[in-house]
Amino acid sequence: MHPIIFQLGSFKLPAYGLLVACGYLAGIFYIFRRAAASGINKEALSDLIFYTVLSGMLGAKLFYAATYWEDFGADFLSRAAYLLKSFQYGFVFYGGLIFGSAAFFITARRGKLNALRAADLFAPALALGHAFGRVGCFLAGCCHGSPTACPVSVTFTNPAAEVNPLYLGVPLNPVQLYEAAGNLAIFFLLSAALRRALGGKLPAGAVTALYAALYSALRFFAEFLRGDDRGASRLGLSPAQLISAAVFVAAATVFLRIKSKYEKN
């Protein structure tokens, strides 16, 4: 694919970084467009966005380092050097989600905001931004699929791509695009759900729980098509699949419970 959009001297514009930035901007634009309907002022939203994004990026990188630390080199210095050198790549989404969510709820509490209603506003934006990010993964070659004989495949030939060198020139499942399309579909579903929530037809927190359930299901099945290093397997499942299964059960339970309670009242 095209891991570098263009190069001017020593300056390189990586495709992944550009698409992630576009994803953040699209998500922020969406949040501010819905701000008035949610009743949350834009200044408070700015603080939420800043601390959530910063903590999310840190968490995603820390989870990546913890998962693949032993593969980075022979000693601490070489591993740390590799981590800094490859900073533009290597993020674990669930790490970002956990750290970002923690920062979000702490910031919302300090700002005396309705945290669940604010989370409902952020949920569609998160799915939209993630869709952009997965397109960036596709262009960069990271998070790639497994070899396939399926007519729908992609072949990476650029040595600069982040794909496993053993898979250069091999048809792979375009799993990044599958997940990008899935996240885009989730975005539209959540946008419709948010309109219902802001109209009083769904309880606060329902959109957030729905997002967690939908994305965890998407990620669980997408993992079967991944061909990059997935970490140590347990029960025949990758770490991301185990997390996805736990998140799905918890989110589905929460969604059904708060919806049932809301309907009774």
Image: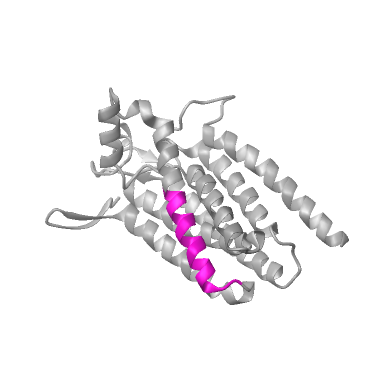
Q: Is residue 26 above or below residue 174?
A: below
Q: In the rendered structure, which segment of residues is drawn in magenta?
A: 40-57
> From this viewpoint, is residue 77 visible?
yes
> Magenta segment, principal secondary structure?
helix
Q: Is residue 151 above or below residue 122?
A: above
Q: The C terminus appears in which quarter of the rendering?
A: bottom right
Towards the viewer: 150 or 135 = 135
Q: In this view, does 191 lie above or below 82?
A: below
**Count of number-bearing discs:** 0
Residue 87: x and y in percent read 31, 44
Magenta-colored stretch includes residue 69: no
Residue lying farthest to the left in this orientation? 9
Left/right placement of residue 132 relative to residue 206 reads left
Q: Quadrant of residue 61?
A: top left
Residue found 29% across the figure and 34% down from its top: 80
Residue found 56% across the figure and 61% down from its top: 122
> From this viewpoint, is residue 229 visible?
no
Residue 91: x and y in percent read 41, 44
Residue lying farthest to the bottom in this orientation? 36
Residue found 49% across the figure and 38% down from its top: 225
Residue 29: x and y in percent read 47, 70
Left/right placement of residue 181 relative to residue 15 reads right
Towards the viewer: 21 or 217 = 21
Residue lying farthest to the right in this orientation? 264
Residue lying farthest to the top in this orientation? 74
Towards the viewer: 101 or 214 = 101
Residue found 69% across the figure and 58% down from its top: 205
Q: Is residue 11 above or below residue 40?
A: above
